[in-house]
Image (tube, rainbow, N blue to C red):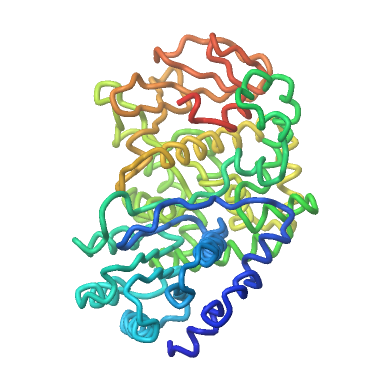
Amino acid sequence: MKLDEIAEINPWWKDKESINNDDKIKAAQNSGIRWDRGQIFTYDKGIFSLRGPRQTGKTTWIKFRIRELLSRGIDPRSILYLSCDKISDFKELANSLSEFKEWAKQDELFIFLDEISFVEEWQRGLKYLVDKGDLKKSTIIVTGSSSLDITKSVERLPGRTGTGKRHFLFYPMTFREYVEARGQLQDLLIKKDWIGDCQLYIKEINGLVIDYCKSGGISSAVPVFTHDKNIPTYIYDTYAAWITGDLAKAEKRENLSRQIIHKIIESYVSSLNWTNIAKVTAAESHSTIADYVDTMEKLFFLQYVYTYAAHKKGAGFARNKKIYFADPFLFFLGIFMTRNIERPFEFCNEFLLSKENQGKLIEGIVLNSIVAELNRRTQRDDFDYKNYVFFWSDGTGEVDFVVSMDEKEPIGIEVKWRNKPQLKRYPFKRSLILTEKEYNPEKGFIPVGVFLLDPGRWI
């Protein structure tokens, strides 16, 4: 890209107030919800990655950070934003950055490269400039909707990435973020020790849990649902096209991908192994299934957990897995992609009339929230939730999730979306039973909505 083309998407170079007219910022301000994850990391020198599903607000997050930098008095000419879907290859990337650097005439730059995965071998372009010394004092943030290449690509830049944590995950809105974005439960959550009054708000909390089942934390769906109590079909269409396109880029067959998704939905919350799925699809072998599921996980479409092996205090890799969608909206997207459903939101509403179906979605949401919480607190660049979250089964009983962190005693978490769950003997000294309404912390009974508002309190 030539400098005049780059300038068109960086209008603050001419007028720093123009950032307030940015489409993403205006859309966020006019959306009717109040949500910005804020500054995730400090602007140290080096290369950082921010990865997460599509439509979770990564580009909007960048634009808000640019506005913050401008408000702090940072020279507008030192801030660059590039949407990498307009960059053809790593050479053009290097040339564009070089032209910007020469024009800016500054050493300390803030460079935001959005959806870097569009540029094949993008790390070669950055490596060339860093090796020349052109970017040694710059903060470079690359974003992407896939972890298939970004992490490995950054790791191929030894000595060029700065110190400290540099890989960050941008998950969909958590339930707590969703509630706050909608301006709900303010009277409760404003209290420092709100947990003491949570029982007074159970009806409202549970209503929001069911709402969250419909829109999830997907930023394109939440404002529309909040305003209209509906999610238009075009949102499902658009997201399905992205997923299909991303799978095609990863050289995954569309028909087989849909068959796998269909089987996961059909067996939702039940344990599976790769062979179970291979038998009902056109896959050549169980290893093909493993490859496809792993790819869909790296596209932030799925999450899966291994069986907990107590003697290893970790995963029993050869045993069954439980596979979930990475957000409840994606569950209904999966149904939309694999069945002839013309009105997906109407189907969603009808599906959630069933208590059993609600429980399935909520079990997946509990996993999503655990993963997001563990990611939030980790300082590791190589964080993989599958090393910390499992499920347990001995053939006669099952515990939905087992969280095993560091040297702490593992905690078993059972999701029982009913009012009066039966108390069972679980094989873990620390156990939580997440209920519909029952609140008795001494016995381990916590309403699931209360857990979702602050999972870090309990795990």
Kindly indicate the quadrant of the structure image that contains residue 97. Answer: bottom left
**Is 344 or 120 nearer to us in this picture?**
120
Kindly indicate the quadrant of the structure image that contains residue 311. Answer: top left
Residue in the image at 69% along x and 60% along y: 29
Residue in the image at 31% along x and 61% along y: 45
94 relative position to 145: left or right: left
**Is 377 or 252 nearer to us in this picture?**
377
Q: Position of residue 227 (x, y in %)?
A: 78, 53
357 relative position to 427: left or right: right
Q: Tell me the quadrant of the picture where the N terminus can be found.
A: bottom left
Decide: is 404 above or below 68: above
Q: Tell me the quadrant of the picture where the C terminus can be found.
A: top left
392 relative position to 135: left or right: right
Residue in the image at 74% along x and 56% along y: 343
**Residue closest to the far right:** 228
Q: Quick check: can you spot residue 65?
A: yes
**Is 358 or 49 nearer to us in this picture?**
49
Q: Position of residue 53 (x, y in %)?
A: 50, 56
Decide: is 351 above or below 332: above
